[in-house]
Image (cartoon, grey):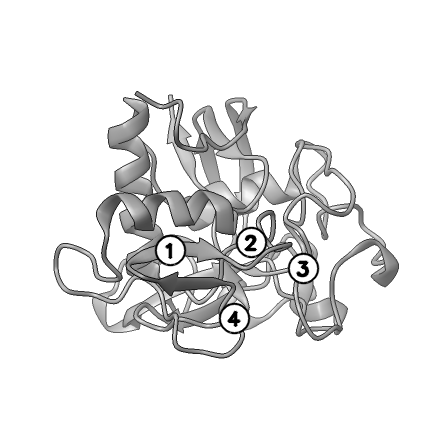
Amino acid sequence: MTDWIEIPELVRLEEDDFIMGDIWGDGDLDELPTYQVHMKPFFISKYTITNRAFQCFLNDIKSELDQDGNKIIDLDKADSLILKRNGEFRCKEGYEEYPVTRISWYGARAYCQWLGNKAGKKFKLPTECQWQYASMGPKRLKWALGDIFDRSEYIVNCNEPESAKSGKESDTGLFNVTGNVFEWCEDEYAFKLNCKEDDKILKKHRVIKGGAFILGESHNLRNGKRFSCYEASCLNCIGFRVVSEI
């Protein structure tokens, strides 16, 4: 049943306790208050989802809209790496392994649901806590590859992303957690961490993490850094990973 789709390569992260938020003391106000999280084990995709994987999804559902009528992907922009020709979706030649972009949060969620149905197991977007736990690793690193920022190690400060499989592998076995493209998280954005107050949540805006190729300042690429984006937006700098909980 799954031989015609691309099942993401997954990395298992083990159960542990960690401190969520700005544990380094130089972050922004929305990275506070820090708090302890007991993280149960889960699987996360080694790479961001690629154009090749996403085109399989689009060709199967034969639509650019999800079941609720939300736009999944914007194919009308000149920099879209997936094209629609004669009713069939195809990524541009040479960009098969690039992270899929121009997808909304709804599109990322719809892909997770579809993949779960095809693979016979549940997939979802990572929560912000799962994302930060995976990005920091057991050493609780400030950036994906270390506590000292070396711009040459990341896909940043440039005009376009690169292959999802380029660069160096992190301690947790992931690629391009810092830089290349932002990554959608499951959570609505709140103006502070561990928020329990409804009026402190920015409705219909989701957390995005990891920074992107368009950024160059190290502060904005930290594992603790939080950005928000309107969930219907389809930008050329946002992609996603998937999580499967155990």
Q: Position of residue 36 (x, y in %)?
A: 49, 41
- Which residue is label 2 attached to? 99
Position of the C terminus by quadrant: top left
The dot on residue 179 is: 3
Camera-nearest residue between 33 and 107: 107
What amino acid type is highlighted by mark number 3?
Gly
Can residue 131 be seen at all in this image of the molecule? yes
The residue that label 4 is drawn on is 236
Tell which of 84 and 229 is nearer to you: 84
Helix, strand or loop at label 1? It is strand
Q: Which mark is residue 219?
A: none
Q: CA distance from mark 2 to mark 1?
A: 16 Å
**Residue type at numbered disc 4:** Asn
- Residue 159's spot in the image, x, y percent? 70, 75
SS class, disc 4: loop
Q: Which residue is mark 1?
A: 89
Residue 59 position in % (x across, y down): 31, 48
Residue found 34% across the figure and 40% down from its top: 124
